[in-house]
């Protein structure tokens, strides 16, 4: 029974990650085009992934974001909703890196930034299913005890709470 439950949870989390990601793109360029363009794109891609992300730790919103968040609920625009989600975490670190975890396993990681004016968290995935994608989450609500985000396609709202055990460890 536990195996089935774990399989269902893993499937749900992968579905959530897939739905929350950016759209795919199709290459419509002429295949006979000179290889110089693709070489330049590869160089730019490498430069982008090597950029250092600076997080403004003096900004109050950023201060509240830097922690280990536990997903507690999601709602999809098609009406599907799930509460009491277990094992799904988003860790936003002060050094500008992030990790997405499911059942203590890192399933994605990369760099994150925060656009203060638009209240958008950008997750530049360097590993995982969304490797190379820049996932954008619009912050709908942010307090010390709650984070509600909307994915970049406007299809899914996720509710996050700080992980209690980690918060207690830091306060000791």
Image (spheres, rainbow, N blue to C red):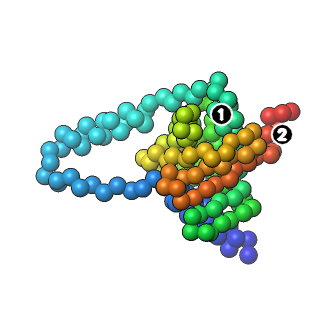
Instruction: Report whether 161 appears left or right of 134.
Output: right
Residue 163 lies, with reference to residue 28, above or below; the image says above
Q: Residue at x 61, y 69 (%)?
A: 79
Residue 116 lies, with reference to residue 162, above or below; the image says above
Q: Residue at x 82, y 38 (%)?
A: 169
**How packed is label 1: few (under 14 Cα within 10 Å), some, or many (20 or more)?**
some
Q: Secondary structure at mark 2?
A: helix
Instruction: Report whether 132 appears left or right of 139.
Output: left
**Which x, y percent locates residue 120?**
55, 41
- Mark 2 sits on what residue? 168
- Mark 1 sits on what residue? 61
> Which residue appears farthest toward the right when viewing the image?
172
Camera sees residue 112 = no
**Which x, y percent locates residue 157?**
61, 56
Q: Nearer the viewer, mark 2 or mark 1?
A: 1
Q: Nearer the viewer, residue 72 or 32?
A: 72
């Amino acid at each position: 029974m536990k195996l089935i439950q774990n399989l269902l949870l893993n499937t749900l989390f992968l579905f959530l990650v897939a739905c929350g990601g950016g759209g795919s793109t199709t290459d419509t360029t002429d295949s006979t085009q000179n290889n110089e363009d693709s070489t330049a794109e590869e160089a730019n891609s490498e430069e982008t992934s090597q950029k250092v992300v600076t997080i403004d730790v003096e900004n109050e919103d950023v201060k509240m974001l830097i922690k280990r968040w536990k997903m507690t609920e999601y709602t999809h625009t098609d009406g599907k909703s799930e509460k009491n989600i277990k094992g799904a975490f988003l860790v936003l670190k002060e050094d500008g890196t992030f990790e997405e975890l499911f059942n203590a396993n890192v399933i994605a990681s990369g760099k994150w930034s925060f656009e203060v004016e638009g209240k958008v968290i950008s997750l530049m995935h360097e590993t995982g299913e969304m490797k190379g994608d820049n996932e954008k989450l619009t912050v709908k609500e942010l307090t010390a005890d709650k984070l509600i985000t909307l994915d970049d396609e406007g299809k899914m709202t996720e509710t996050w709470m700080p992980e209690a055990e980690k918060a207690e460890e830091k306060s000791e």
